[in-house]
Amino acid sequence: MTPDCGQGPTNVAERIMPALIRILVWGGVFAVVFILRSFFLLLFLTFVFGYIQNRGVNRLQGLIPNRPLRVVLVASIFLGVLITVGVLLVPRAKDQTVLFVTQLPQYVERLDQELGALGERYPMIANAIPELGAFADHSAPGDGKSRVAALVQQIFGMGDPPDGQHKVNQLLDLVRGVGGRIAAIASAFLLALLFSFLIVLDLPRLSASVCSLENSKLGFVYREVAGSIRDFAMVLGKALEAQFVIALVNATLTAIGVSLLGLGSSMAFLTVIVFLCSFIPVLGVFISSVPICLIALQDSGLTTMMLGIVMITVIHLLEGYVLNPRIYGSYMRINPVIVLVILTVGAKLFHIWGLVLGVPICTYIFGHVIQHKEMVAAAPLSCPRDDDPE
């Protein structure tokens, strides 16, 4: 009996081909994502607006059977809320943001003075942190020498004083130039509103069209990526929904605290900063605290700044020990050290998108790809049937 010489190569090919096809499919997906990287803001906003509206449409299903009517009603409410916020809050926040950016050098100079006084009052602290004793000769303003700049250089490793000071100045210029992107963001915002409405309105047909790819020549691509994309969209949507509630509570409590501290003239700006930074886990607390501390120091002195720090600490202790367990439960709760590592790597590789999406992506990879890969693979993607009225 002669052995089948072709059996070995056939078995090897049967093992290699699925893995090769999987690599090619996901390589194509990542290539498309890379090509569309300049549209990330538009895609992200479209997903967020579409997710919010679709959730509202589904919740009204028992009250309003007609889906197009539900979509129009939810879109009208959503647009009305955005217009109300835009009319009442955005102009004030814009004016206060311009004022903050304009007065940023004065804030830094005042912080410089306080740091110098702290170093002179407590020599032990000045010895432990040499930057506090730097420039003790009180050089003339505008000569580029700053204790704050020296501390930033030391903390973030920006190099020697000349090079570090240059980078600090670049950072300040970047803050001042944020307004240049407002037009692009506004354009993406409006387009995302339009696209999300059209997608939600025609979602059943779009879902049926996508599901029909399973029986086409691209069926192998659909079977490989459809389930993963669906699961990731659900993880991202739930994470953003939970973080939105937390951000709203943080912004409300911050507005109350800022008002009690006598900083009501900057309330809109500080509230918006806290709301936006609440979508960045852990690191967002420190980012949003900087404007509060600077404005409190400049307007009311060191005591008010310390009270502001106490207020921020209380709010985020409430978030960490009360809101997060109730809103997230065990979902997406990661050790803060791991979160900082994810944010550091994400910010280095993908900038702002790494800060916003780093934690949800890592949560999905660990919870759905690594731990529950077999469960996800076993769960088929549900597609609308021809007789489905929706």
Image: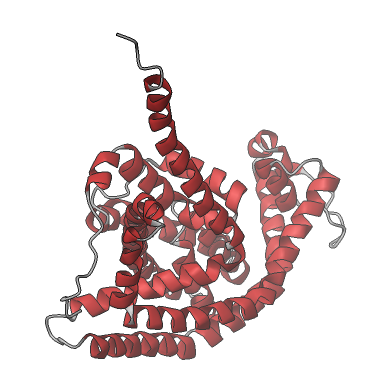
Residue that protrudes farthest toward the front in the picture? 1
Q: Is residue 237 left or right of residue 57?
A: right
Q: Is residue 283 left or right of residue 153?
A: left
Question: Residue 131 occupies which quadrant of the picture?
Answer: top right
- Indicate the position of residue 107 as horizontal and vertical percent values: 68, 65
- Indicate the position of residue 303 as horizontal and vertical percent values: 53, 61
Residue 90 visible in the current orientation: yes
* Relative vertical location of residue 301 with respect to residue 380 in this rendering, above or below: below
Residue that protrudes farthest toward the left in the picture? 62
Please tell me which residue lies in front, 376 or 326.
Answer: 376
Please tell me which residue lies in front, 119 or 330.
Answer: 330
- Indicate the position of residue 179 as horizontal and vertical percent values: 67, 76
Residue at position x 19%, y 76% in the image:
59
Residue at position x 17%, y 80% in the image:
389
- Indicate the position of residue 261 as horizontal and vertical percent values: 46, 71
Give the image's coloring scheme. Answer: secondary structure
* Relative vertical location of residue 233 with respect to residue 337 in this rendering, above or below: below
Residue at position x 35%, y 52% in the image:
228
* Relative vertical location of residue 5 with respect to residue 34 in this rendering, above or below: above
Question: Residue 123 occupies which quadrant of the picture?
Answer: top right
Please tell me which residue lies in front, 292 or 276.
Answer: 276
Quarter of the image with the C terminus in it: bottom left
Residue at position x 54%, y 48% in the image:
346
Quarter of the image with the N terminus in it: top left
Residue 286 visible in the current orientation: no
Please tell me which residue lies in front, 352 or 134.
Answer: 352
Q: Is residue 90 left or right of residue 388?
A: right
The total number of labels drawn is: 0
